[in-house]
Image (cartoon, rainbow, N blue to C red):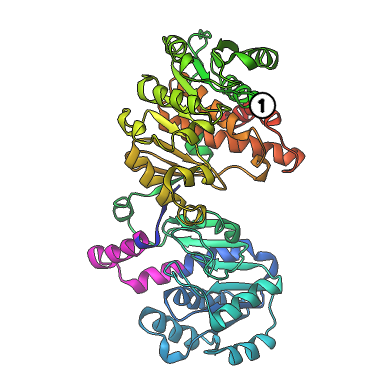
Amino acid sequence: MKLYSADQVREFDRQTMDEIGIPGIVLMENAGVAATNLFCAHFVDVFPGPVVVLAGKGNNGGDGYVMARHLLNRGWQVVTLILAESEAISGDAAHNLRALIACGGVVEFCPEETSLDLALESLNVRVIIDALFGTGLSSPVRGHYARAIDWINGKGYPVFSVDIPSGIDATNGRVLGRAVKAKETVTFAVGKVGQVLAPGCEYVGRLHVADIGIPPQVTSRGRGVVFVEAAEASALFPMRPFAGHKGTFGHLVVVGGSKGKSGAAAMTAEGALRSGAGLVTVACPAGIHDILETKLTEAMTVSLPDAAGSLDLRAYDDIKRLWRQKQALALGPGLGLSEGGAALAGCIVRDCPLPLVVDADGINVLCDQKDLLSARPAGTTVLTPHSGEMSRLTGVPVSEIEADRVGVAGDFAKKYGVVLVLKGARTVIASPDGDLFINSTGNPGLATGGMGDVLTGVISGLLVQGLPPLEAAVLGVFWHGCAADDLGQVQGNAGMTATDLLRQLPLTRHQILT
């Protein structure tokens, strides 16, 4: 599914009205009818209500007036509370308000907190329609609008939000002071980015996209963000030819591990094997080689010169020999933060001709060597930072990154020519060409040690099987999160471990593809 920002949606509306010639009042009627149909389908068990429509003075309120009229005509008991004076309503919304009243609709105007409180006290309600604010909201909710949202959330009745839960920023998913918690949300024409990003996605409930007559030639002009679901991900899995052998499915080199961090390199190696890679070799310090030999049964290991339990430049020539006739290299899991490790990582990023996946300590040691990324061919390097690592890479505070995950990821990917995987709730994947993806899978069970190392292995394993870096990142993130979701259905989200996830990966792949 393609997603768009609030500005893009406004432009779609303008083009539809000004260039195509479809009047705004027609779009509003179509929106109200589509929303009414969905409402009736999902709340048939509470017919005939009563239903309360809480509406604002703008076009979102106008959609609510259309809904109230059509629900009334279908036999529902409807009361509409408008949080404004009647004189404040204009344009298409005013036209539909007059039509609602002419059809016998019960309408009360509540322009301030006192009148709103009096109206709310006398209401009988079984379901609430939220039509207070649409996708144009960009400032904090205040006054009696905030009071109305508190009332909606405090009643415990099911809520149907029109276009977006009121109080959510449609572009970035931020809660603007407070927001309606919906059970169902109908959005119009296209999905909005803020409806799937955290924390906004926690308020949307089930999201439905309704056609309101905006032509495809209009929406196709906008470069959207892809929301990655099973349909998009399943098409990316590499083929497994009947006559294939371990050489067919590629050979990965993992450079990492240090004293106290052998598990990170092991998790990456096993993640690659579980993703279908044919062969994996882990290049590690001599001091932990025997530990990794014990941990890893299916992967090969190579002992490299050791500097106090970490790799340094003395290992570089051996690593160059190792990457010959291999298909990808994973750099960083458990590498450590020594000066020697940083120098080694810089040389690998500078010289390695293979696609690279850089994670964990590999990212941390590159914070002062980011220009090395720009020197590589665009799109051949995958970086997988969480917000803390992204903050160290960019110098941008974590709070600012979390407030604009899509923008920060997209800008960095274009500036440095990398495929960026910004991990977190609703991971964002960005390409150097400006392509943007938001992942739909994953849960809090992933918030434990080793999960990122497994993801590095999965993405790297897909690379050696022939997927381009961007596709490997998109599929790897979806598959990794989907495996966690499958596990969560069985054992819950607490206590999930990276080894649990490793065992689940092949099962989840099979379920996605069948």
- Residue 304 is one of the magenta-drawn residues: no
Residue at position x 49%, y 36% in the image? 364
Res 484 seen here: yes
On the image, the x and y values in percent for residue 386 come to 53, 42
Image height of 420 relative to 187, above or below: above
* Label 1: few (<14), some (14–19) or many (≥20) C-alpha neighbours in 10 Å: few
The image quarter in which residue 150 lies: bottom right
On the image, the x and y values in percent for residue 470 come to 41, 33
Residue at position x 53%, y 38% in the image? 230
The image quarter in which residue 282 lies: top right
Res 465 seen here: no
Mark 1 secondary-structure assignment = loop
| Main secondary structure found in the magenta portion | helix
Residue at position x 38%, y 20% in the image? 352
What amino acid is found at the position of numbered circle 1 in the picture?
Gly
What residue did someone put label 1 on?
260
Residue that extends furthest to the left in the rendered view of this protein: 19
- Residue 20 is one of the magenta-drawn residues: yes
Q: Which residues are magenta?
A: 8-31
On the image, the x and y values in percent for residue 395 come to 43, 48
User: Closer to the camera, 106 or 347?
Assistant: 347
User: Closer to the camera, 422 or 70?
Assistant: 422
